[in-house]
C-alpha cells in the first residue's frame, strides 16, 4: 500500500490482445492485485479506433516489409490512460515503458528502479512496431518519461510476453507482494552474482546426498560455502557478470596517477560518510572537495592506490612536513574492511618515509573507534591538545621503525 492507503503501484497495459495479459490474474501478482497492492488495468488498443474494422496498422512510409501501428489509436489510448489518474496519484504521470528489441536491456536493477515508481504504463507493440510520433506525443504533449526496454537480444512477435515478464519482475519487488522480503536479498542478480544451489528434504534422494556442510548447522561456514558456489556458478555460466573484484585477486598497491582521480574522489566520499554521520557534519574536506582538489593533491602529496582485480579498493597518501612524515586519507572500501588492507596501506605509507624523519603522524576522527584501535596497535599514540587538528579529530604520532 502507498502511504495514503492506495495501491503501491498502478500499472496500465495497452495491447491489441488484452486476453494475453490474463496471466496477471494468477499467482503472486494476481494475489497482490486482490490485496490492493497492485492496481493493474489492461486496455484494448482497438477501443481507440474509429473505423468499422478497428484498424490499428498501416503500410510503412518509405516502403519495406510489414505493417506499422498507427499513431492515432495509440495517442488516444495514452491520453485515456493519463486521464484515468486516481486521486491517490496526486499529480503523478505514468512512466511509459515500450517493450522493443532495440531498447535498453531489462535487468534486475531496472526492475528495482521501476518498482519505486507510482505508476507505469506499458505499450505492447505488434507488427514492425509503433509510429515514431507516438513517442513524441507521449513525451512532448503528455509529458511522460518514455523508456524503450528490451527483454533480450531476440525478436518476439509482440510486446505482451515482454510485459508479462517485466510486470512479474517489477511487481514482486513492490513491498508486501512477496511475503518473505528476505528471500529477495540473496537472489540471482541482486548483487551481481547468480544464486547458490538449492536443496530440500530428503537428505538423501536416489542415492544423491545433500552437501554435508548444509547439514552442519555452522551458519558462517554455510554462508562461505554458498558464496563460493555463487562465484563458481557465475564464472561458469555468466562470466560477463563476474567483475574481477569478486575474485580472490591479489591487492596491488601502486602510485596514483591522474587517471585514478575520478575513482579516488568517489572512494573518499564513500569512506568519509561514516565520519560525517558520527560527527553530524558534512563539513569534512574528503566530502566537500571536488575532482580538481583531488587532482591537485597528487602534486602536493604522494598518493597510493590499492586495486583488486582492477577495482579501486583503498588509498593512502603521505607528505613531508620538516621531519614529520604525515599519513592522510587512509581508506578502504566498506565491503573489504576488517581484512587487514588498512593495516597494509598504513605499513606501506610508513615504509616510504625518507631518511631523516623523526615522527610519523596522522589524524583520525575522535569517535572512529575502529581506526583508533588499529593505529594504537600499530604503535601510534594520541597527542593531547595538538595544534591545527581539524574539529572532531585527534592527532597521533609514532617514531619511525616502531
Ligand atoms: N521491427 C522491430 C525491430 O526490428 O526492432 C521488431 C518488431 S517485433 C516483430 C514486434 C513487437 O514485439 C515489438 O514492437 C515489441 O513490442 C515486441 N518485441 C519483440 N522483441 C522484443 C524484445 N526482445 N523485447 C521486448 N519486446 C520485444
Image (cartoon, rainbow, N blue to C red):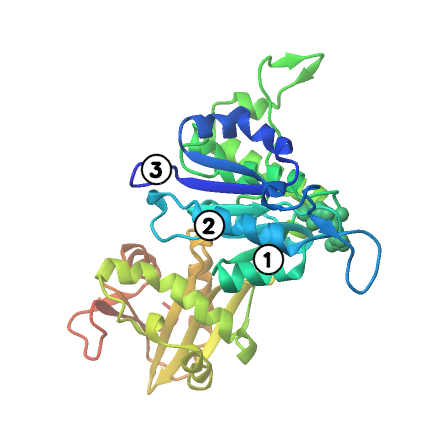
**Residue at position x 23%, y 74% in the image:** 390
Q: Position of residue 392 (x, y in %)?
A: 21, 67
Q: Quadrant of the N terminus?
A: top left
Disc 2 and disc 3 in contact, CB within 8 angstroms: no
- Reading the image, the residue beneath label 3 is 6
Where is residue 278, by image quadrant?
bottom left
Q: Quadrant of the C terminus?
A: bottom left
Q: Position of residue 389 (x, y in %)?
A: 22, 75
Q: Residues within 10 Å of mark 1 (few under 14, many from 20)?
A: few
Q: Is residue 45 visible?
A: yes
Disc 1 and disc 2 in contact, CB within 8 angstroms: no
> Relative to residue 165, is residue 157 drawn left or right?
right
Which type of secondary structure does the marked residue at label 2 adopt? helix
Where is residue 25, by image quadrant?
top right
- Reading the image, the residue beneath label 1 is 250
Return the disc, 2 or 3, that comes first in the chain's sequence: 3
Q: Position of residue 319 (x, y in %)?
A: 39, 81
183 and 360: which one is in front?
183
Which type of secondary structure does the marked residue at label 1 adopt? loop
> Relative to residue 56, is residue 171 drawn left or right?
left
Disc 3 and disc 1 in contact, CB within 8 angstroms: no
Disc assigned to residue 82: 2
User: Is residue 230 placed above or below 58 in the rendered structure?
Assistant: above
Q: Position of residue 241 (x, y in %)?
A: 64, 50
Q: Nearer the viewer, mark 3 or mark 1?
A: 3
User: Is residue 320 placed above or below 94 in the rendered structure?
Assistant: below
**Residue at position x 40%, y 67% in the image:** 268
Amino acid at each position: 500500500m502507498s502511504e495514503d492507503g492506495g495501491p503501491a503501484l498502478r500499472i496500465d497495459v495497452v495491447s491489441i490482445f488484452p486476453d494475453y495479459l490474463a496471466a496477471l490474474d494468477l499467482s503472486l501478482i494476481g494475489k497482490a492485485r486482490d490485496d490492493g497492492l497492485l492496481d493493474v488495468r489492461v486496455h484494448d488498443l482497438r477501443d481507440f479506433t474509429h473505423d468499422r474494422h478497428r484498424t490499428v496498422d498501416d503500410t510503412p512510409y518509405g516502403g519495406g516489409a510489414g505493417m506499422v501501428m498507427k499513431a492515432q489509436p495509440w495517442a488516444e489510448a495514452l491520453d485515456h490512460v493519463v486521464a484515468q489518474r486516481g486521486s491517490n496519484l496526486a499529480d503523478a504521470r505514468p512512466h511509459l515503458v515500450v517493450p522493443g528489441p532495440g531498447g535498453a536491456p531489462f535487468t534486475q536493477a531496472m526492475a528495482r528502479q521501476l518498482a519505486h515508481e507510482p505508476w507505469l504504463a506499458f505499450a505492447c507493440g505488434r507488427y514492425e512496431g509503433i509510429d515514431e510520433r507516438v513517442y513524441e506525443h507521449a513525451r512532448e504533449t503528455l509529458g511522460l518519461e518514455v523508456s524503450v526496454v528490451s527483454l533480450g537480444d531476440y525478436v518476439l512477435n509482440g510486446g505482451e510476453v515482454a510485459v508479462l515478464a517485466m510486470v512479474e519482475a517489477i511487481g514482486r519487488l513492490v513491498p508486501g507482494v512477496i511475503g518473505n522480503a528476505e528471500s529477495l536479498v540473496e537472489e540471482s542478480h541482486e548483487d551481481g552474482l547468480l544464486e547458490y544451489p538449492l536443496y530440500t528434504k530428503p537428505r538423501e534422494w536416489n542415492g544423491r546426498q545433500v552437501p554435508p556442510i548444509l547439514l552442519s548447522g555452522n551458519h558462517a561456514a554455510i554462508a562461505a560455502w554458498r558464496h563460493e558456489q555463487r562465484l563458481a556458478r557465475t564464472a561458469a555460466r555468466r562470466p560477463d557478470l563476474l567483475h574481477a573484484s569478486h575474485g580472490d585477486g591479489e591487492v596491488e598497491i601502486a602510485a596514483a596517477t591522474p587517471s585514478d582521480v575520478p575513482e579516488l574522489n568517489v572512494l573518499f566520499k564513500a569512506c568519509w560518510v561514516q565520519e560525517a554521520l558520527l560527527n553530524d557534519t558534512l563539513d569534512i574536506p574528503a566530502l566537500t572537495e571536488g575532482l580538481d582538489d583531488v587532482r591537485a593533491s597528487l602534486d602536493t602529496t604522494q598518493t597510493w592506490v590499492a586495486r583488486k582485480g582492477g577495482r579501486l579498493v583503498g588509498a593512502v597518501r603521505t607528505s613531508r612536513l620538516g621531519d614529520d612524515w604525515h599519513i592522510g586519507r587512509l581508506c578502504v572500501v566498506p565491503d573489504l574492511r576488517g581484512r587487514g588492507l588498512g593495516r597494509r596501506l598504513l605499513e606501506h605509507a610508513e615504509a616510504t618515509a625518507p631518511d631523516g624523519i623523526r615522527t610519523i603522524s596522522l589524524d583520525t576522527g575522535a569517535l572512529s573507534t575502529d581506526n583508533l584501535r588499529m593505529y594504537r596497535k600499530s604503535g601510534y599514540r594520541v597527542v593531547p591538545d595538538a595544534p591545527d587538528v581539524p574539529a572532531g579529530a585527534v592527532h597521533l604520532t609514532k617514531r619511525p621503525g616502531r
